[in-house]
Amino acid sequence: MVTYIIKRVLYMAMVLFIVVSITFFMIHSVPGDPLTSSVMNLPDEVRDNYYARYGLDKPLFEQYLRFWKLLFTEGSLGESIKYPGRMVEEFILKYAGISARLGIISVVLGFSVGTVFGILAAIFKNRWPDYAVMLTAIAGVTIPVFVLAAVFQYFFTVKLQWFPTTGWGTVKHMILPIACMCLSPIATYARYMRSSALDVLGQDYILTAESKGVSSFNVVKRHVLRNSILPSITLLGPSVASVFTGSFVIESMFAIPGLGTYFIRAINERDFTMVLGMNLFYCLLYIASLLLVDILYVFIDPRIRLATSKERRKKAHAE
């Protein structure tokens, strides 16, 4: 396990380097620069000082090396171009918590409710609970999140006036955004759990447990849930990363001061250092969540660990 983790960490570092490098050269390939509109009316000496401050007066490859040098020597992602005096890591530390609070609740609810719905749909196959779950899954997959957010805002804020339309700070501000973000995960996990649970319910050991008089609840708890949840766990890794990346639209529509809002602004304003630093953070979060899921496999299903040990013994015997 330790060797496997070390290998994966090395792969993660390589992927992170490649993704950040591609992002750097792509964003710099767009014509113009983020300072043109801000300093065009300033004297030449002042304008040159601004460009030198952010290293934009240097050749592109020198700017690239400057980014990595700053990261490894000072542990900094650089200063925001559009917010002078504020470092990118300050934005991440300050606003990531809001996106995390919003996203983690959505992922937990989506995973929990979707898992329960999927198992119920499998148990009551071709009956009304199954049809209700599948209808919810289809709706969750086909309805865009911005359409759902607009509908919720119209009915629950304009018509009924139950919740505030925009803003952040109270529980009421969280309900509609979380409801919008929950529907897609619920639909996805329900579909995967239904398919996986149907396969497990048809296995011989399920029939054996039922013939021994094991209650339906214990059959589901001890056998169906544990053996059918692996596909959903696989999806959980990307879902954790989407805690930050998937809330861009919701944060914009509900005016939530989360990390996604500032990332969209950075892209529109071509704030090079902000885009690069946040992209590095998102990429690190994503690949780390995938590693965590792979480790969870071993604890959820011991057969994975057993299979790995057998392969190692076979390889040693062959040598």
Image (cartoon, rainbow, N blue to C red):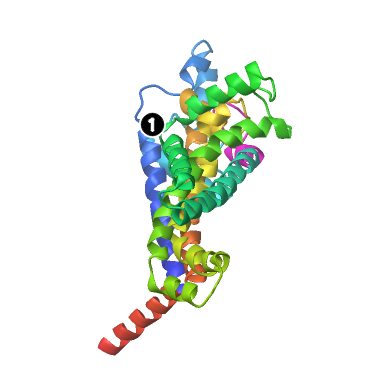
Name the kind of residue labelled 1 in the image: His
Farthest residue to the bottom: give it: 317
- Figure quadrant of the C terminus: bottom left
Q: Is residue 226 above or below residue 305?
A: above
- Going 36% across and 37% down the picture, which residue do you hit? 25
Q: Is residue 72 above or below residue 260?
A: below
Q: Is residue 213 in sight in this rendering?
A: yes
Examine the structure image and report whether residue 95 is included in the region drawn in magenta.
Answer: yes
- Going 66% across and 34% down the picture, which residue do you hit? 174
Element class at badge 1: helix
- Going 49% across and 69% down the picture, which residue do you hit? 223
Q: Residues within 10 Å of mark 1 (few under 14, many from 20)?
A: few
Q: Position of residue 301 (x, y in %)?
A: 47, 70
Q: Is residue 137 above or below residue 57?
A: below
Farthest residue to the top: give it: 41
Query: The magenta stretch spans which residues?
Result: 80-96
Residue 173: image quadrant is top right
Q: Is residue 9 above or below residue 76?
A: below
Given residues 32 and 96, the one toward you in this image is: 96
Q: Position of residue 285 (x, y in %)?
A: 51, 50
Q: Position of residue 57 (x, y in %)?
A: 44, 29
- For the image, the number of numbered tags is 1
The residue carrying mark 1 is 28
- Going 54% across and 43% down the picture, which residue do you hit? 243
Q: Position of residue 143 (x, y in %)?
A: 44, 31
Farthest residue to the left: give it: 318
- Left/right placement of residue 105 relative to residue 188 reads right
Examine the structure image and report whether residue 314 is included in the region drawn in magenta.
Answer: no
Given residues 236 and 57, the one toward you in this image is: 236
Farthest residue to the right: give it: 170
